[in-house]
Amino acid sequence: MRPEDIALYRDPDSGSALVIAAVEEQIDGLIKTGTIATEDGSRRYPIREFVPRFVPHDNYARSFGLQWNRFRTVQLDSHTGLTLSKDRFFDTSGWTGEELRGRRVLEAGCGAGRFTEVVLRAGADLYSVDYSDSVDAVRSTVGPRSGLHLAQADLYSLPFPEAFFDRIFCYGVLQHTPDPRRAFHSLVPHLKRGGLVSIDIYRVRPFPSRWNSKYLWRPLTRRLRPETLFRIVEWYVPRWLPLDTALSRVPPLGAGVASLIPCWNYTGILPLSKDQITNWAILDTFDALSPRYDKPATLGAVRRWFEQAGLTEIEVRPGGNGIVGNGRRS
């Protein structure tokens, strides 16, 4: 954390200004370990590994910290040699790179940084937060950079002033919060008047398929320790993939059988190499089975969120992880 960046943050509970209370270790002008606090010292937050931490280390998003620190580079365009993250980001948001240059942007839930690097390359002043310690993965793979500000924080209580950002995006996150609607409404006050917000969320689907059969297994898998579940997924997915691929080519019975065993198989769907197919399958299968919360929404519900937030130029459509929502703060 840069010492001068303290002026950008606010106490998540009171909204009051923060100060640097202690610096324990500093490297190349960056605070590696220290403490920030409210001016009266009543609330204190640690800085660990250069990142301010506004949430407890052990929290409901621990599985995401595990997966993104294990798979730091799997989905980054800079490592795949593809443009999957770039294409998804600009298709979902409808924004252009030119529009982002010099803009103050909030990334609400950064994961391992697949969209972080896309927005930074466009020249934005980017504030990336995550509830899990995946922020450490982002700092390792994408940062440090002058335009990147990282914090471990809660979407319900963001450590920033209101009306602070020109753009806010939140991809792959809302469904994994205790209350997706509340999480969305917590973002909007931090958007400037005239600013744009873009989200996606899982979609409620009435019929069973490869992509929602996970709900048959989640009552069990989400109760396992993330480390235990990860070892199980890491063992069975590479062994099941070839059979899953073969069964998927024998509709409808084969595809139906394949869908009963959770395996996020992108063979024939994404232009990935054999090794990439395996890594993405392990990552996304674990991602589907491990989160404490998985709360899909309907198109109608998401549209109501935008309307209730007083947004204009509303666009809600199928896309992204299921549903895409875009709007402007009037």
Image (tube, rainbow, N blue to C red):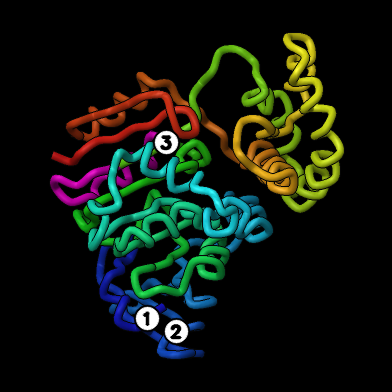
| Residue 171: mark | none
| Residue 31: mark | 2
Comes first in the chain, label 2 or label 1: 1
Q: Amino acid at mark 2?
A: Ile
Q: Is residue 77 left or right of residue 213?
A: left
Local packing at callout 1 (Cα closer than 10 Å; few below 14, some 14-19, many 20+) is: some
Residue 65 in view in this figure? no
State the quadrant of the C terminus.
top left
Q: Is residue 27 left or right of residue 307?
A: right
**Mark 3–mark 1 distance (CA, rounded to whole Å):** 31 Å
Local packing at callout 3 (Cα closer than 10 Å; few below 14, some 14-19, many 20+) is: many
Residue 189 locus on image (x, y percent) = 23, 48
State the quadrant of the N terminus.
bottom left
| Residue 2: mark | 1
Q: Of helix, strand and loop, which one carries label 3?
A: strand
Q: Is residue 167 left or right of residue 130?
A: left
Count numbered badges in the picture.
Answer: 3
Residue 50 locus on image (x, y percent) = 48, 77
Residue 239 sits above or below residue 15 on the image? above
Q: Amino acid at mark 3?
A: Asp
Q: Of helix, strand and loop, which one carries label 2?
A: strand
In the rendered image, the residue lying farthest to the top is 252
Asked whether the beta carbons under mark 2 and mark 1 sit within 8 Å of each other, the answer is yes
Quarter of the rendering containing residue 151? bottom left
Residue 18 sits above or below residue 109 on the image? below
Closer to viewer: mark 2 or mark 3: 3
Residue 19 locus on image (x, y percent) = 31, 80
* Residue that label 3 marks: 200
Please report the bounds of the magenta region as a residue range.
181-197
Comes first in the chain, label 3 or label 1: 1
Q: Residue at x 44, y 48 (%)?
A: 86
